[in-house]
Amino acid sequence: MKKYPCFILARKNSKGLKNKNIAKLLKKPLIYYTVKFAKSSKLVSKVIVSTDDSRIFNIAKKLGCYVIYPRPKKLSNDSAKSEDALIHAINNYEANFDKISAFSYLQITEPLRPKNILDKCIKVFNKKKCDSVFAAFKTHKNYWIKDKKNYFRISPKNQSILPRQIKTPVLREDTGVALITKKENLYKYKSRIGKKIEIIEYDSFHGLIDIHTSKDLKLAKILLKNKISN
């Protein structure tokens, strides 16, 4: 079965949790868990880390990654888009290795993932010839958004009053947990997700973790200390 490179973006500086990508989670830097997960995949050909941080460079090198360093400042500030950073990383990769048609992607802030979920995405991608396959957290909760001063329900009203057992679930896009996508989605549409998609659903505790604050980090520590892991 065809394998693909996996790209991980890891810039320095963060507002909610200082240096979150290397924050210690049970004595290991946060980036360790995502790199470890990527390297455990049977369908990832190489793990690539793009960073502007010398500390992340050293950690990723020791973990056996190909590291793109330094990432340009314009692709590393608060307003920089992940899509632009990924294009830069892919261009660098292709200049040093081979041309690619697709790539996988993981996000450091989501260190706890359902077992083999990236491989599941890649297997479906290879089989169904779609543009993108990604993980999505399944929930039966009702969702609202705020537009200026008003609140609007985005969950279908006819579903909101139904019992959970027969209610149609809502799927939360989690490309940071696992994503495989065609390269042309980035280059043509500046999007990580193409038009023809498949979704790998999950509803486990892993969906609770997306680390951006010290409280998020504490919750992840509790789960790992109780041996609830990948």
Image (tube, helix red, strand yellow):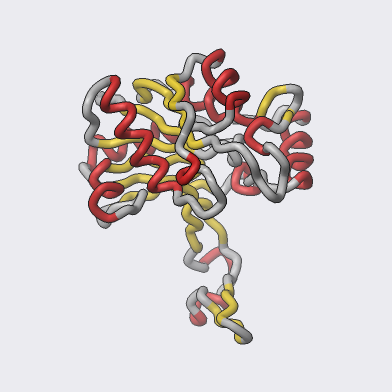
Residue at 52%, 39% in the rendered image: 107
Vertical position of residue 205 compared to residue 173: above or below? above
Q: Residue 170: percent from the left, percent from the top? A: 50, 63
Q: Is residue 10 left or right of residue 190?
A: right
Residue with the most extreme front position: 73
Quadrant location of the C terminus in the rendered image: top right
At 45% from the left edge and 51% from the top edge, which residue is drawn? 81
User: Based on the displayed image, in which of its 4 quarters is residue 89 positioned?
Assistant: top left
Q: Position of residue 217 (x, y in %)?
A: 74, 40
- Image quarter where the N terminus lies is top left
Question: Quadrant of the rendered structure where residue 145 is?
Answer: bottom right
Where residue 141 appears, as percent x and y from the top left, is: 60, 66
Q: Is residue 117 visible?
A: no
Q: Is residue 26 above or below residue 170?
A: above
Instruction: Identify which residue, 14 or 132, lies in the foreground.
Output: 14
In this view, 61 is above or below 178: above
Above or below, 96 relative to 193: above
Left or right: residue 126 versus residue 25 is: left
Where residue 17 appears, as percent x and y from the top left, is: 72, 44
In the orientation shown, which residue stands out farthest toward the bottom? Answer: 150
| Res. 74 visible in picture | yes
**How many marks are shown on the rendered structure?**
0
Q: Image point 33% across, 29% down: which residue?
A: 92
Q: Nearer the viewer, residue 71 or 100?
A: 71
Give the residue displayed 60% in from the left and 37% down from the top.
12
